[in-house]
């Protein structure tokens, strides 16, 4: 017997109701981005490896899917869409001086270690604002995240905001080399502050620096923590970072988004190209952020256009998981079913065409004389069909609502 093929580890098939929900979510989120004036862009699923090279600041090379074209060039499946958009924007809008608003949806590919149990292919939907380096641009992106998550039905979520300059300034006060700083950064990212304290205790570090890192876990919360962060700021860059967060929060109040905003001054960017504010959105029912974003003022310069930018990506698969576990329904286009016999075929097709002309989704199935209605009811329920019209040879229609269970019989004239 021939062995059936299955998907590789870390990827999966999405179909039926789950696929409908995913597409509906993407449509809702895209609507919000379009309402803010963002225009769609599609970039290739794979690029030259140089687009994601180490200097760009994306993920490590060993976590990428790499291969060669017939000319020997190294290519990579995109692990992150932002560098692809940056490359495209630097070329397509090279002379543009006005703000460029772009949005996208696409799959990313990261070769995670198998033991992590994470998907290796994820769908990301995001937006990039290229050009302005302003608090207004920062606030617009954050407001868009809040509006998007509310649009899909989430009520309990928080967008946590930090600033690269604050945490970097604090790390530099240790006097450690890059490798040691990266070690501390990773411990902080994992909330392992005991590990940080242990490293600082074992090395020659000023007491004031140790105290700053002891206080760092407390710098998470509402706008009130910004005063404490300001007192802790070790240099002018850190003070400017806190001041910028204050100004952004004022604008977010105008957007009526403040209910979903918190600050986390210990946050460091997941990508090396982040250069200003960074943010993540969290909700219940998922172990990871559903949105990641930040400012990347130097990324486009690596592709030939020296201009500041900010963006975010919504991880659609994580968002779906959260909505499912929170039992938040997602409206999709309702599907309907017409079941007919050989003698009612013409009638059924005319009915279906009439419904489709009015924007209804109609599936038709011919039944055999010996079939019973329950067979098709079970099929409809399994495939998330809302209603069924069961045509009988004597011009009667049995109309069944598969959601409420209501049914009625009407007599109609065949078309």
Image (spheres, rainbow, N blue to C red):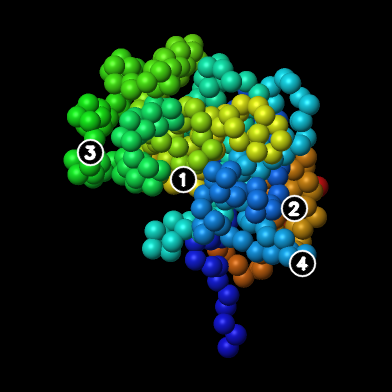
**Residue tagged by mark 3?**
204
- Label 2 vs label 4, nearer the camera: 4
Q: CA distance from mark 2 to mark 3?
A: 83 Å
Task: Residue at 29%, 16% (x, y): give it.
Answer: 231
Q: Is residue 247 above or below residue 340?
A: above
Q: Left or right: 205 with respect to 100? A: left
Name the spot of residue 369 as percent of width and height, x first. 66, 68
Q: Which mark is residue 318?
A: 1
Q: CA distance from mark 1 to mark 4?
A: 36 Å
The image quarter containing residue 27 is: top right
> Which label's residue is closer to the chain start, 1 or 2?
1
Q: Is residue 394 above or below residue 269?
A: below
Task: Residue at 74%, 21% (x, y): give it.
Answer: 97
Q: CA distance from mark 1 to mark 2?
A: 41 Å
> Which label's residue is closer to the chain start, 3 or 1?
3
**Residue tagged by mark 2?**
348
Q: Is disc 3 surrounded by few (<14), some (14 to 19) or many (20+) residues within 10 Å?
A: few
Towards the viewer: 313 or 170: 170
Q: Secondary structure at mark 2?
A: helix
Name the spot of residue 289 as percent of width and height, x first. 42, 40
- Looking at the image, the residue that sits furthest to the bottom is 1
Towards the viewer: 91 or 174: 174
- Label 1 vs label 2, nearer the camera: 1
The image quarter containing residue 96 is: top right
Q: CA distance from mark 3 to mark 1?
A: 42 Å
Task: Residue at 41%, 59% (x, y): give it.
Answer: 117
- Label 4 vs label 3, nearer the camera: 3
> Which label's residue is closer to the chain start, 2 or 4?
4
- Label 3 vs label 1, nearer the camera: 3
Q: CA distance from mark 4 to mark 3?
A: 54 Å
């Amino acid at each position: 017997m021939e062995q059936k093929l299955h998907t590789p580890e870390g990827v999966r098939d999405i179909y039926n109701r789950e696929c409908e929900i995913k597409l509906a979510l993407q449509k809702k989120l895209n609507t919000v981005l379009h309402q803010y004036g963002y225009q769609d862009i599609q970039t290739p699923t794979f690029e030259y490896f140089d687009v994601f090279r180490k200097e760009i600041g994306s993920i490590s090379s060993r976590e990428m899917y790499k291969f060669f074209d017939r000319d020997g060039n190294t290519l990579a499946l995109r692990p992150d869409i932002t560098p692809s958009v940056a490359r495209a924007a630097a070329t397509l809008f090279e002379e543009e001086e006005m703000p460029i608003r772009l949005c996208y949806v696409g799959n990313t590919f990261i070769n995670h270690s198998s033991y992590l149990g994470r998907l290796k292919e994820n769908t990301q939907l995001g937006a990039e604002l290229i050009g302005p380096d302003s608090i207004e641009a920062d606030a617009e992106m954050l407001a868009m995240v809040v509006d998007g998550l509310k649009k899909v039905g989430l009520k309990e979520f928080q967008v946590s905001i930090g600033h690269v300059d604050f945490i970097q300034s604090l790390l530099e006060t240790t006097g450690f080399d890059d490798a040691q700083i990266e070690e501390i950064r990773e411990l902080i990212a994992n909330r392992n502050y005991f590990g940080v304290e242990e490293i600082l205790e074992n090395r020659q570090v000023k007491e004031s620096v140790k105290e700053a890192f002891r206080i760092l876990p407390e710098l998470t919360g509402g706008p009130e923590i910004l005063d404490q962060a300001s007192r802790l700021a070790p240099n002018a860059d850190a003070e400017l970072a806190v001041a910028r967060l204050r100004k952004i929060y004022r604008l977010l109040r105008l957007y009526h988004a403040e209910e979903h905003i918190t600050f986390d001054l210990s946050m460091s960017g997941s990508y090396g190209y982040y250069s200003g504010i960074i943010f993540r959105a969290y909700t219940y029912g998922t172990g990871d952020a559903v949105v990641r974003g930040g400012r990347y003022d130097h990324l486009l310069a690596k592709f030939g256009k020296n201009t500041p930018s900010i963006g975010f990506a919504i991880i659609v698969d994580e968002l779906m998981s959260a909505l499912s576990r929170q039992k938040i329904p997602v409206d999709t286009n309702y599907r309907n079913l017409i079941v007919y016999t050989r003698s009612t075929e013409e009638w059924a097709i005319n009915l279906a065409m009439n419904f489709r002309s009015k924007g209804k989704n109609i599936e038709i199935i011919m039944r055999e004389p010996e079939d019973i209605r329950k067979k098709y009811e079970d099929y409809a329920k399994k495939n998330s069909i809302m209603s069924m019209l069961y045509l009988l040879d004597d011009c009667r229609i049995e109309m069944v609502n598969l959601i409420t269970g209501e049914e009625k019989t009407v007599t109609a004239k065949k078309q």
